[in-house]
Image (cartoon, rainbow, N blue to C red):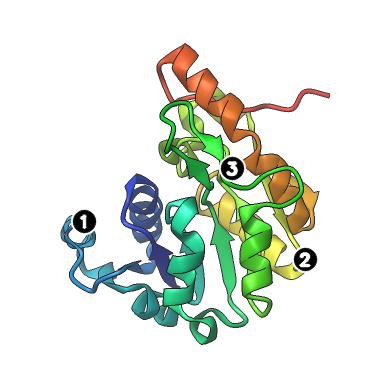
Amino acid sequence: MKIAVLGTGIVGDAIGTKLVQCGHEVKMGSRTATNAKAAAWVMKNGIRASQGTFADAASFGEIVFNCTHGGASLEALNLAGVNNLKNKILIDIANALDFSKGMPPSLVVCNTDSLGEQIQRAFPDTKVIKTLNTMNCNLMVNPGLVANGDHDIFISGNDVEAKATVTKILRDWFGWKSIVDLGDITNARATEMLLPIWVRLYGKFQSPNFNFKIVR
C-alpha cells in the first residue's frame, strides 16, 4: 500500500519506519521537498521510502498519517490540499500542545472542541480517525515494550468503515491487542485531554515507556 506520513519529527520517523518495515511504500511530507530530516529518514529506510512536500505525500498516499505538531496541523493539512485528502482515511496522531509558557504544556483546544474535530470540520470529505495520540511514539509501533502489550489504545471517528480499517492496521501492522472504540470524532476531546496527565507521569517516571490500561 502507498502511505503518506506528514511530519518529520520523532513521531513521523517512528510511524514511517514501521510502515516501511511492514512492506509499504511510504512518502514523508514536509513544507519543502528537500527537508533534511526527511532525507535522513529516506536514507535510513531504503527504496520503499521517499520524501516530498505535504501535497506530494498526500497525493501519493492511499492512507495519510498526520504526525505534524498539533499547533501547526491545520496549516500543514491545508498545504497538503483538500483534493489530495478527499475521500481518504486520515489517521490523526497529533496533539495541540502549547509550550509558550514552558513545561508542562497546556492544551491549545480542549473541553468543548478538539484538534480531531477541527480537522474533520476543515476537511469534511476526509475520514478523520483519531488514535495513537495517548502514548510515546516508540510504544505506538511496538506495544510490547510495556507489559507484553497488555494495555489499551483508543480510537474515535465518524466513519464506521474507516474505523474498522484503522483498527485492522493497529492490530495487524502495529501489534495492538486491545483497541477501545470510543465512538464519533467528538471523543477526540477526551483522548487529547489525557495529555496533561501523560506529561506529568512522564515527569514522575522519567521514562516514556508507560501507557493506560482500563480495568473493569
Q: Looking at the picture, how far across and down is residue 87, in whole percent? A: 62, 81
Residue 175 numbered mark, or none: none
Q: Looking at the picture, how far across and down is residue 193, in whole percent? A: 66, 37
Q: Looking at the picture, how far across and down is residue 136, in whole percent? A: 46, 35
Q: Is mark 1 on a helix, strand or loop?
A: helix
Q: Mark 1 points at which residue?
A: 37
Q: In this view, does 1 lie above or below 183?
A: below
Q: Name the residue under label 3.
A: 176
Residue reaching furthest front?
101
Residue reaching furthest bottom?
83
Q: Which of marks 2 and 1 is in front?
A: 1
Q: Nearer the viewer, mark 2 or mark 3?
A: 2
Residue 160 numbered mark, or none: 2
Identity, as a three-letter code, of the amino acid under mark 1: Lys
For this view, does 204 lie left or right of residue 121? Answer: left
Q: Earlier in the sequence, mark 3 or mark 1?
A: 1
